[in-house]
Amino acid sequence: MKLFDGRRAPNPRRVRVFLAEKGILVPLVPVDMAALEHRGGDVGARNPLRRLPVLELDDGTIITESVAICRYFEELQPEPALFGRDALGKALVEMWQRRVELNLLASVAAAFRHIHPAMKEWEVPQIPEWGEANKPKAVEFLRFLDDELAHRPFIAGEAYSIADITGLIAIDFMKPARIKVPEDCANVLRWYELVSSRPSAAA
């Protein structure tokens, strides 16, 4: 088994943080995304979409998409449970994971990909207006999340989950996207300090 890893990119990091929380060690194959190595070669041969991460199992089976990879490892090693425990817990984690991914991480990614000069070769056409339009979308969701976090320690409830990992990745990605967490979002800032202090956040 091996994991093709893009290091600084958000989705490969999401898998690394998840694996760190589980205490699972998987050999990493570093891919230089700045040099566009993910566009061809070993990655392109395994994932026609030419995106990372890519997990290759010992029998040659390929799994792509970060959350799908995380779900695979959740089934292999259920503890600690990062996708919820019972039917309700799993539904709530899924709900919040989707909310954070679609309303925060996707908006931050759009802002970065359509505004940052380094992304001109990646995002064709690069539309700066669309990038700018996504900045307030991210902030609006953070204010919504701030209200929710007034009632619980973690995004999906009382326990840390994949939703928190996605949120952590999204907020860390806000810096290169030139978006800031509003200073009055005290609950988001409290939560961010909590999750970013976990050893797995350094993965």
Image (cartoon, rainbow, N blue to C red):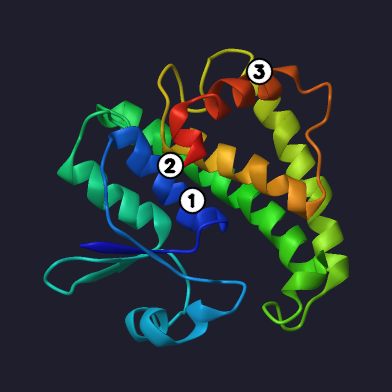
Q: Position of residue 148 (x, y in %)?
A: 62, 22
- Mark 1 touches mark 2? (CB < 8 Å): yes
Q: Position of residue 11 (x, y in %)?
A: 50, 56
Gap in angstroms between the C-alphas marked 3 and 1? 22 Å
Q: Quadrant of the N terminus?
A: bottom left
When the figure is inspected, residue 19 is found, relative to residue 86, above or below; the finding is below
The numbered disc on residue 64 is none
Residue bearing the label numbered 3: 190
- Mark 3 touches mark 1? (CB < 8 Å): no
Helix, strand or loop at disc 1? helix
**Does residue 125 appear anywhere in the picture?**
yes
**Which residue type carries mark 3?**
Arg
Q: Residues within 10 Å of mark 3 (few under 14, many from 20)?
A: some
**Does residue 96 appear anywhere in the picture?**
no
Gap in angstroms between the C-alphas marked 1 and 2? 6 Å
Helix, strand or loop at disc 3? helix
Q: Position of residue 191 (x, y in %)?
A: 60, 22
**Which residue type carries mark 2?**
Val
Residue at the (72%, 83%) spot, across then down: 124
Tell which of 148 and 161 is nearer to you: 161
When the figure is inspected, residue 63 is found, relative to residue 73, above or below; the finding is below
Residue bearing the label numbered 1: 13
Residue at the (65%, 42%) spot, across then down: 172
Residue at the (19%, 72%) spot, across then down: 61
Gap in angstroms between the C-alphas marked 2 and 3? 20 Å
Q: Name the outermost residue toward the top.
A: 151
Residue bearing the label numbered 2: 17
Q: Quadrant of residue 83?
A: top left
Q: Quadrant of residue 87?
A: top left
Of the image marks 3 and 1, the number of the one nearer the N terminus = 1
